[in-house]
Image (cartoon, rainbow, N blue to C red):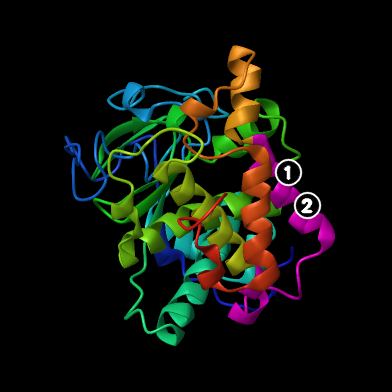
Amino acid sequence: MDFRDDVDLDASQVEDVGGGGGGFPGGGLMVGGGVVGVIVLVVAALFFGIDPAALLGGGDGGAGGDGGARRPATSGSDLGAQCRKGSDADQSDRCRVVGVVNSVQAYWREAFTERGKGAYRNARTILFTGGVNTGCGQASSAVGPFYCPADSRVYLDLGFFGDLESRFGARGGPFAQAYVIAHEYGHHVQNLIGTSRRVGDDRRGAESASVRLELQADCYAGVWAKHAVETGFYTGPFTAADIQEALDAAAAVGDDRIQRRTQGRVDPEGWTHGSAEQRMKWFTTGYRTGAPADCDTFSGAL
């Protein structure tokens, strides 16, 4: 995947807070509002398949690729100076995040208009290291990338991309990273249109609403991939190798693979995100049809 060298990037959509924690000191947990239980439990894209309640409140934790080491924060203005053009996105992980976020949100702005869903509202991505304070409370990097509905932001420790390869066995690569980001923005779309409220207390199990929500976010990521070139940020259609990176990443974080690796057996009753096969299936569905309407994971079998 190559960005157009001359395309302008909007770095205001991404903020790098380093290890400083961010701008929500003491942020409380959000309970209810259609997302029942400890916040981030079902709306976050927790690629680790574990209960995030056990990981909240540990802002000093450090499961990122740098072992939680603190680095100087890069302000929004600094990102703006570093990430100006698509050529920058091809050279820098942080600028690549900016480029992907710009493309994903450009697609959804247009899609909302076409589907009569009202105005799409941008969600900022917060890059952090080790731990971060959010509108949903404090979280450590061990939670993995997640979306917080309380402040409508995506949170990402770039060290996760290293973990995706070293701990989860994915091939990695630029499009694997793009898939992760697009999945999180799928949760933002669900929050905007009210789908997240359908989860309620149905948080675990192979047929649970939580699994259906996550698989729909995978499908939405595929839909974006189908239309990404139309957003003007990329030089041409994604290659088969690009799409394979996304499928490989989706499979690597399937509940069944994580359970088999961590506990030696598969327990569908404990699933929160879906199996490797399901995650690949729904990303492929979105990519094949390019239609958000075809991402109805709440009707019928998965």
Residue 162: tell me if it is visible.
Answer: yes
Q: Specify few, some or many for label 1: CA neighbours under 10 Å numbering under 14, 14-19, or 20 or more.
A: some
Q: Is residue 7 above or below residue 14?
A: below
Q: Nearer the viewer, residue 199 or 226?
A: 199
Residue at 46 percent of width and 33 percent of height: 205
Q: Position of residue 15 (x, y in %)?
A: 39, 54
Residue 88: tell me if it is visible.
Answer: no
Q: Which residue is mark 2?
A: 244
Image: magenta residue range? 226-252
Q: Is residue 118 left or right of residue 7?
A: left
Q: Are marks 1 and 2 in contact (CB under 8 Å)?
A: yes
- How many angstroms separate mark 1 from mark 2 (CA)? 6 Å
* Dot 1: element: helix
Q: Would you say the magenta stretch is mainly helix, strand or loop?
A: helix
Q: Specify few, some or many for label 2: CA neighbours under 10 Å numbering under 14, 14-19, or 20 or more.
A: some
Q: Is residue 66 above or below residue 134?
A: above
Q: Position of residue 41 (x, y in %)?
A: 34, 36
Residue at 64 percent of width and 13 percent of height: 264
Q: Is residue 58 magenta?
A: no
* Dot 2: element: helix
Q: Nearer the viewer, residue 8 or 46?
A: 46
Residue 248 numbered mark, or none? 1
